Structures are given as C-alpha cells and as structure tokens.
Image: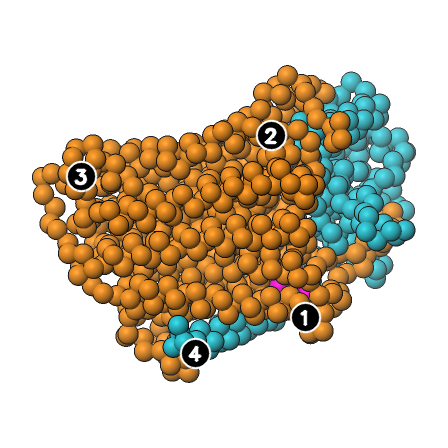
Chain colours: A orange, B cyan
C-alpha cells in the first residue's frame, strides 16, 4: 500500500460525495415532474411518447398496477432481446459475421440484461453482432437501469406520502429517467471516452501486420456508447470478453477513474433524492454514511490483500503485489478499488480478473454482493435494498425499547417487516441453494477451472453474482453450458423480482399510512447511533448467513496458501 | 394487465429506437467527426500498412524487441474447432488466465518465467508484471522497471550502448495522470517502433 494509493481512494470518495447533492437535486426535479434545464428540448419528445402510448401523465398507479406495468414491460423486453439474439445472423450491422446465439445462451443473456445483472456467459467480440450490442444490450442497459431508479422512487413516495393510494406512474418514471437523466449524461460520457481512446465505429475488425510480421485481428465496434451506459447504469456487461480490462473499454487511468465515479454517481445521488423527497436531507446522508463505512472497510481489505500478494508467488522472489490478471496502467490500487466499487454497486464490470485475486482480496467482492448490493448498490436497486434493511433496523430498535417502531413518521408494523424479511431471505436461498446444487451434480462440478477451495469459490461467486444481479465473475468457471446458463438465469430472475415485488408492496402499504408526528420517544434516524445500528444489522442479518460458505472457499484457500500449498487440476 | 400492453409496447419500441439505434448511431457520427483517430481504434500505420493499435499490445518474441507481458488469450484450434490453443495477444478474443492464487499451474508457469528472466539479466530482481498475465491478455504496457530490466539484452542484440537504449526507454515513460491516477508505464509497441527508428532498420 502506498500514500499515492490512499490519495486516489480519498479523491474518489470526495468527488462522489461532491456530486451527490447537485445530481440529487436535479434528479428530484425530474421525478417530481418539475421543469429542468432540458425541458425545452425533451418536453415535446416526452409528451409525444405519452400521446402515442395512451398514457395520462397525471394518472398515478396503485403499487400493484405499478408492479404489473413493470412486469409487462420487462416481459416484452425479454422476448424482444431473446428473439434478436436468435436471429442476429440475418440482420444488418454484422460485419464480422456472428452466427445465431444458442437457445440456452440467449435465455441467459436476455435474462441477464433485463434484470440489470449483465452476467457474461457470452463472449462479446466472439459472439455478438454490432446490432445486438446496440439494439439489444445498450438499450436494455438503459431500460433496466431506468426501471431500478423508477422502483426506488416509488418506494420513496411510500415514505413521503400520507394516506395515499398511489405510488406514482411507472411509465412516467421510466420515460423521464431515461430521457432526462441517463441519455444526456451518456452522450457527454461517450465523447469523453472516445477522446480517451475507446473506439466508436461500425467498421469491422481491423487486420494488422505486427512488427514481427504476424497477423493480428483487432476487434473494434461501437464501444464507447455502450461503455458510457454500462457504468452509469451499473449494468456492467462488456462489449468485449475482458470487459473493462480491455484497453478498448478502458484505455487510460483517467478513463478508469471516471468509470469508477460514474458507477457510484447515480446510486449515491439517490440517497440525496430520498432525503429531499422525505423533506429531510439528513436522512439521506445517514444512509450514505452507513454505505460509506461498509465500502471503506471492504476497499481497505482488498487493497491490503492485493498489495501483499499471494504467498505462493511471493516465495518465488517476486515483489510488488499480485499482478496476475491486472493491467499495468491501473496497477494494484486501480484494480482493487475498481473491484470493491463494481461489486458494492451491482455493476459487475471488471478491470482485472477477480478469479486471480488473492483469496481474501477475492472474498470482499463476494461479501459486497452477499450483503445484497446495498453499499451504494445498483442505480435505484441499492436504495430500495438498503431501505429494506432500514425497516429491519428500525424494527430491531423498536424491540429493544419495547414500543412500536416508526420511521419518518410511518409506523413500521408486521406487514412491512414480513415483506422486508422476504426480500432479504431470497438472496441466501438463491446463492447458497444453487451453489449447493452445483457442488453435487456432475454438470455443476464440470464448471470450475481451478482445483481445491478456489474451485468452490468460483461456483459460489457465480451464484452470488447472479442472484445479486451483479454480473461480475470468477471467470475461470465455464458457465456457458446448459446447466449454468439455466440455473444462473433463474438465480438472476428470482434475485431481481423477489426483491422488487416485496419492496413495492412495502411502498404501497407505507403510502396508505398516516404520518405520526415525532415525539420525544421517537428514535432519531439521522445520527451516528442509527448509522452504527444499521451497519450492525446489515452485517449480522445480511452477512453472517454466508460465513460458513466463505469458510469453505476463500478462508480455507487463504490458510492453505499461507502454508504454501497449491492445488492441481486432476491432482 | 391487458391495459398495460399498449404503453408497454409503444414505450419499448420507442425507447429502443432512441437508446438502441439513434443514440449509438448519432454518437458514432459525432465521434468520427471530432476524434476520428480514436474512434477507429487508435491505429498505427507505417509505410501505409496498419502495424497495430497504440492501445492494444502485440506479441514480441524476438530478443531484438522489448517484450510485453505474458498473455493468456487463446484461439480456436485449426485442427479441431471445439478446442482452443494458446494464441498470445489475440485481439479478437480478449481474456485473462483466471488462475487462482493457489493454482499449481500458475505457480509452475511463473516459476519457469522467473527462471528464464533471471538467466537473461542475472542479479536483478524480476519485475512482477513481466511474469504475470494481464486481465485482457492485450496489455499494451509494461512498468518502467520491466522495460529497464530488458535494456542489457536489447543493447547487445542491437549493438547499441546501454545508455542509449536506457535513454530511449526513459523518454517514453508515461507518468501518472495528473501526477495522481494510475501507475507509470511504457507502451511496448511505441518503444519498439522508436527502437527500430533508432537502429535505422
């Protein structure tokens, strides 16, 4: 670890915090339907869309209609993307002649993008046509991100309204988020990324003759426009197989830094949106503070572990930390920080291969996801995820003092706590259940590329990433098989919608409640005590469940590696 | 549910057209006009022929060139399409080794590479990036230490003085962005192009 490394971490945190308030202010205006700077340009487009679609922008929806609208939209989106993947071979914008995608891989990829997971069973440059990349993936990147934000806003309305029947209009939230928030930011980011060196072309792969006379085929494409949204929308699915480690997806330390900031930018701003909409910005800062504590603790461990390096390689006389699977331009810190961010935020883009991280360095990304992607989290998804934990925290605090818990003037009762626990329990069931299945059937055991505890970690990481809708991987796992494409696809679906629907039910139930004025007995939810309690509940309720599984994977591997033990495939 | 179908269909179609076609195509046009070199892939030409991309590493095996990092990329086996064969710096199929910290295969590979590098420049510590594969398998850079480590070999094979080769390396070290971000590095292709020019070949 170096001073320079810590300066980079501090700079990153400072910029994300500085952006949270202005971005939060702008987004709040967008969600409450107020005029913004872009209204003169986008207003007519927006109203035109509503007219053709038969939407009355003023008409709000009950939480159940909101949920049904969201499901109908995603159902159609899934079918369209699946069809596109199956017929891409005969469509235009396919200069490298990619063939149709197999049914199980098409199912997995369509699910993955619709759920904002963006797991890469597909190989990018070896599998997908430019049309699929743009029309299929880039577009789902926008819409799954916009959906996450819309859902979070609906839940926030549940807290901010009293005796209301509705939580907003899904169609309006979706359209406004896409047009006013995501699209303008992505256009600016695309130009920045091209300036840094990311290609943006419809021309096919380039043939080069290297200095030594060999032929090199260099895959290019409309990369920058997709990278912009994949980071901002915390999607993470790469244009290329190597994702953000590929020099064409992330050419410089500056592009790396901007990508890291944009992964966190909207998620952090959403906490400020929450504070503004409930009428007390301190409530948002308290949540962001709890996220920051967990984030910094995780980052410090990854940075330390990767700087210390692997004992097995260090014993060969190498110094300078663990560089296997990392790029020189990012170095140890640039890779460790990115890994912590991308897994905390449900992004899942990677700029280094997590599979080759040290045992403990690779464990933190897993923990970040297992906590439920609530450390800033996916855009929108992070906020509704942590609000579910807030409800449990308030409930626990209420139990301690023996009075009905309340949060922001809303009484938290049996129904809300049940729904919150349903959302929380879904993740361990998917992650641990499927991991257990994969370790006992032959099709599952055929997946890992590494032997010993690391092979188990590869499986655990895969199902953790799928259910948490992250999408990063221990890439050695051969996941493009019927077994993994199907089970991971199911994990993604349940992990997304079995959290979303209970969260919307909470929104509806809260919106209908009266607001009770704060009294001397009300537990203040903007101070250090609340932040500490929230962090504790997240670690105990969300994290402890996974400790036995982690003990079998990364923890055993750390101890074995410390003794110099290695594991050979087939040995 | 049925009354949700019209808005769902219309918005899906319209937003798909906006974000999936209009946006990437407009950005392609704009990027090509403002930053044509980068948009096309930062290609480097010499004598009218494309010799590579300034951002993509390429395989150097000759002793006469500075060598980049080991690469774990592969390609389809020409003899059997269901298998793959190692193909370093295959820029049509990026990937890392994905070998874990307790992998015996990784330990053996690094051990062999360290031994080979030690033989080339005895007494010097081997820079870690020279014996580890990158995440993409296409890393265009090596650390300044890794470039300087190869100076004695290059000087010998090219018949240049070590000081001259070292000066060549030092002139091409790119520092941290704004003095803070990332790590110092040397682009191997740019360095080798400069080396060829220097040697007058």
In the image, residue A453 lies at what x, y percent? Answer: 62, 29
C-alpha span from label 2 to label 1: 41 Å
The residue that label 4 is drawn on is: B6
The residue that label 2 is drawn on is: A358
Tell which tag, 2 or 1, sits nearer the viewer.
1
Q: Are marks 2 and 1 in contact (CB under 8 Å)?
A: no
The residue that label 3 is drawn on is: A523
Closer to the chain start, of discs 2 and 3, is: 2
Helix, strand or loop for disc 2: loop
Q: Quadrant of residue A504?
A: bottom left
In the image, residue B139 lies at what x, y percent? Answer: 70, 43
Left or right of B24 in this view: B191: right
* Callout 2: chain: A
Left or right of A135 in this view: A450: right
Mark 4 Cα-neighbour bin, 10 Å: few <14, some 14–19, many ≥20: some
Tell which tag, 4 or 3, sits nearer the viewer.
4
Tell which tag, 2 or 3, sits nearer the viewer.
3
For residue B107, above or below residue A73: above
Q: Is residue B121 magenta?
A: no
Query: Can you name the residue that lies furthest to the front here?
Result: A441
Q: Are marks 2 and 4 in contact (CB under 8 Å)?
A: no
């Amino acid at each position: 670890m170096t001073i320079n490394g810590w300066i980079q971490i501090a700079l990153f945190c400072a910029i994300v915090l500085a952006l949270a308030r202005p971005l939060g202010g702008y987004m709040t205006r967008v969600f409450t339907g107020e005029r913004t700077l872009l209204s003169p340009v986008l207003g007519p487009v927006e109203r035109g869309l509503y007219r053709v679609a038969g939407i009355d922008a003023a008409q709000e929806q009950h939480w159940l209609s909101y949920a049904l609208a969201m499901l109908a939209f995603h159902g159609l989106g899934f079918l369209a993307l699946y069809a596109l993947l199956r017929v891409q071979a005969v469509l235009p914008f396919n200069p490298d002649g990619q063939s149709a995608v197999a049914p199980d891989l098409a199912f997995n990829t369509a699910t993955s993008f619709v759920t904002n997971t963006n797991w890469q069973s597909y190989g990018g440059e070896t599998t997908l046509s430019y049309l699929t990349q743009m029309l299929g993936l880039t577009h789902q990147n926008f819409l799954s991100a916009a959906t996450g934000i819309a859902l979070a806003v609906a839940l926030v309305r549940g807290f901010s309204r009293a005796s209301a029947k509705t939580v907003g209009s899904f169609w309006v939230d979706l359209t406004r988020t896409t047009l006013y928030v995501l699209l303008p930011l992505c256009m600016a980011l695309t130009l920045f990324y091209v300036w840094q060196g990311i290609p943006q072309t419809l021309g096919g792969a380039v043939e080069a003759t290297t200095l030594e006379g060999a032929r090199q085929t260099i895959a290019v494409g409309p990369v920058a426009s997709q990278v912009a949204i994949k980071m901002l929308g915390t999607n993470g699915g790469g244009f290329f197989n190597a994702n953000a480690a590929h020099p064409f997806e992330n050419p410089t330390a500056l592009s790396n830094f901007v990508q890291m900031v944009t992964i966190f930018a909207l998620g952090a701003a959403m906490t400020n949106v929450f504070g503004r909409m409930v009428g007390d910005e301190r409530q948002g800062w308290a949540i962001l503070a709890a996220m920051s504590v967990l984030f910094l603790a995780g980052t410090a461990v990854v940075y330390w572990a990767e700087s210390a390096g692997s004992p097995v390689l260090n014993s060969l006389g190498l110094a300078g930390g663990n560089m296997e699977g990392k790029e020189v331009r990012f170095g140890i810190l640039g890779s460790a920080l990115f890994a912590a961010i991308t897994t905390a935020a449900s992004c899942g883009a990677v700029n280094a291969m997590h599979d080759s991280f040290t045992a403990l360095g690779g464990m933190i990304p897993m923990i970040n996801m297992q906590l439920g992607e609530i450390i800033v989290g996916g855009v929108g998804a992070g906020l509704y995820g942590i609000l579910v934990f807030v409800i449990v925290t308030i409930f626990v605090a209420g139990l301690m003092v023996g009075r009905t818990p309340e949060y922001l003037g809303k009484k938290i009762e049996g129904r809300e706590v049940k729904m919150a626990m349903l959302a929380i329990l879904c993740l361990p069931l998917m992650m641990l259940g499927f991991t257990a299945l994969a370790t006992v059937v032959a099709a599952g055991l055929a997946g890992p590329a590494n032997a010993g505890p690391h092979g188990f970690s590869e499986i655990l990481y895969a199902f953790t990433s799928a259910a948490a809708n992250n999408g990063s991987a221990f890439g050695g796992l051969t996941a493009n098989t019927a077994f993994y494409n199907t089970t991971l696809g199911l994990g993604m679906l349940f992990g997304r919608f079995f959290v979303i629907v209970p969260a919307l039910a909470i929104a509806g139930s809260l919106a209908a409640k009266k607001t009770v004025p704060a009294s001397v007995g009300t537990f203040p939810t903007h101070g250090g005590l609340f932040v500490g309690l929230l962090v504790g509940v997240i670690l105990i309720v969300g994290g402890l469940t996974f400790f036995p599984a982690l003990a079998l994977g990364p923890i055993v591997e750390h101890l074995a590696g410390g003794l110099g033990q290695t594991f050979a495939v087939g040995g | 549910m049925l009354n949700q179908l019209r808005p769902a269909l219309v918005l899906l179609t319209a937003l798909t057209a906006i974000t999936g076609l209009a946006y990437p195509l407009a950005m392609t046009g704009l990027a090509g006009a403002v930053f044509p070199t980068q948009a096309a892939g930062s290609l480097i030409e010499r004598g009218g022929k494309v010799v590579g991309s300034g951002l993509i590493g390429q395989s150097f095996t000759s002793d006469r060139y500075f060598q980049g990092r080991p690469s774990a990329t592969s390609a389809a086996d020409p003899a059997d399409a269901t298998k793959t064969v190692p193909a370093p710096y295959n820029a049509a199929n990026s990937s890392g080794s994905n070998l874990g910290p307790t992998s015996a295969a990784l330990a053996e590979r690094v051990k062999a590479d360290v031994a080979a590098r030690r033989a080339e420049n005895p007494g010097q510590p081997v820079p870690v990036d020279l014996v580890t594969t990158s995440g993409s398998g296409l890393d265009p850079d090596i650390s300044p230490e890794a470039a300087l480590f190869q100076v004695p070999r290059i000087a010998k094979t090219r018949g240049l003085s070590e000081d001259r080769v070292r000066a060549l390396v030092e002139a091409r070290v790119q520092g941290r962005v704004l003095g803070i971000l990332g790590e110092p590095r040397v682009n191997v292709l740019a360095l080798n192009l400069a080396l060829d020019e220097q040697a007058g070949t």
